[in-house]
Image (cartoon, rainbow, N blue to C red):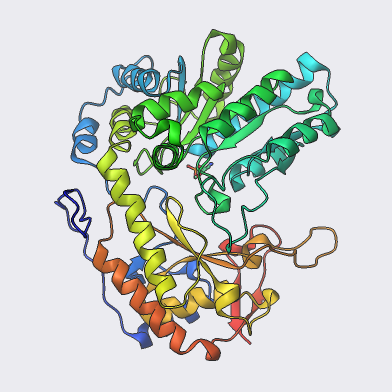
Amino acid sequence: MDNFKHLPEPFRIRVIEPVKRTTIEYREEALKRAGMNPFLLDSEDVFIDLLTDSGTGAVTQDMQAAMLRGDEAYSGSRSYHALCKAVKEIFGYEYTIPTHQGRGAEQVYIPVLIEKCLREKGGDRSKMVAISNYFFDTTQGHTQINQCVARNVYTPNAFNTKVYEDFKGNFDLEKLEQSIQEIGPQHVPYIVLTITCNSAGGQPVSIANMKAAYEIAKKYDIPVVMDSARFAENAYFIQQREKEYADWTIEQITYESYKYADMLAMSAKKDAMVPMGGLLCFKDEKWLEEYNACRTLCVVQEGFPTYGGLEGGAMERLAVGLRDGMRQDWLEYRIAQVRYLVEGLEAIGIYCQQPGGHAAFVDAGRLLPHIPAEQFPAQALSCELYRVAGIRAVEIGSFLLGRDPKTGKQLPCPAELLRLTIPRATYTQTHMDFIIEAFGRVKENVAKIRGLDFTYEPKVLRHFTARLKEI
Ligand SMILES: *Cc1c(COP(=O)(O)O)cnc(C)c1O
């Protein structure tokens, strides 16, 4: 706006959710009760909650108003048609199934695409390998419980926090084609294009890369699924960084991007701004058979296919959220807020992955070199951040990764990161300044932070329920 130094929130806040201020003694007690695992804290005891941006943000007034229009008919509701119309206009896709969230779409499409591959290409189930620029954890989970291996072929510098690249979410295209040949195209049931690439730190994928990956997939007749949680942030990065698209609107870039996939699966809890919701959509009549197979599975898993996992009002709200999430000034502000936080942290010597879409990723390994990976430096940092300032963040490192199921040994992790995830339109610039100040206090005391060890360790998905103690 007119070259001002500040980029204030482009909205007014009209609803207030009070939060509790707590003392350091109170938080030390709460941490003890939670077994040094902030995941187990009560939300009431958290002052700034940066656990996730999934379904935790504010909604717009148009979204709120749209909820009241809900048609709750069991079949063929008006709200379903409103949602289909929005999908058609925004992404150009013909067929829509609403789901309760992203993993609802995954549990439906993944078995259908694997069956299609077995039936049409005569592949061998024990040799199935699906490929992605990087699988989100639930997408990987659904792939694996369908006896298919999940392989990531990401760009070489994706996890190098010391190197800047415009599109760290990109596929390594050479490796993609090599992998297909090595696995055998008849054994690759699908390719998942994740935008933005969450696991690499919310990093974008360029249209050039999508296009090239799609051409490779077509050459070997493999379906491409766009895993679309942060489609609008990805479009914004393309507009800012990929020269050919500098003059395009977010809407035009989004429409163009979806030409390079056959289906989309979406967690609508991210860029589409709803507290709960998801989508599974198919491009055109070429995918009619898969669409119908997914509708059948949807009936038993999510609900009748014209409501899927959602009530009528929630479908109306989602139809509006898809559009509101693409506003230029909104995306500019959101990405700038993440960048502001990262730059503020780096200015006081707290190093991060280059700023991406939805979160700052603090390099905890670098900040706490005295704590070895198997004592979880990022988890220890997470506890200290809560103790000092009531801020809850989430460990993305060895603690999350877990052990090798065969040997029981801790798996080696490429980086020990602490993710500070920014919910949409929920926290202001002052909150960002407070977070940076809190890290300043943590840093003063950094040598005294101790590593952690388990007092209780579940065998799978341990990070959700494990309990720990200081060493
Ligand atoms: C969040 C997310 C999912 C899973 O969606 P849920 O709504 O949490 O079930 C899948 N893929 C990506 C890329 C995501 O960000």
Residue 423 locus on image (x, y percent): 35, 54
Q: Residue at x 67, y 64 (%)?
A: 458
Q: Residue at x 42, y 76 (%)?
A: 386
Q: Residue at x 45, y 57 (%)?
A: 355
Q: Is residue 43 visible?
A: no
Whether residue 62 sits left or right of residue 448 in the image: it is left
**Is 299 drawn above or below residue 455 in the view shown?**
above
Q: Quadrant of residue 111?
A: top right
**Is 441 drawn above or below residue 112 in the view shown?**
below
- Which residue occupies the foreground of this view, 46 or 157? 157
- Which residue occupies the foreground of this view, 320 or 197? 197
- Which residue occupies the foreground of this view, 78 or 218? 218
Q: Residue at x 70, y 75 (%)?
A: 374
Tell which residue pokes out farthest to the front in this image: 243
Residue 389 locus on image (x, y percent): 36, 78
Tell which residue pokes out farthest to the top in this image: 285
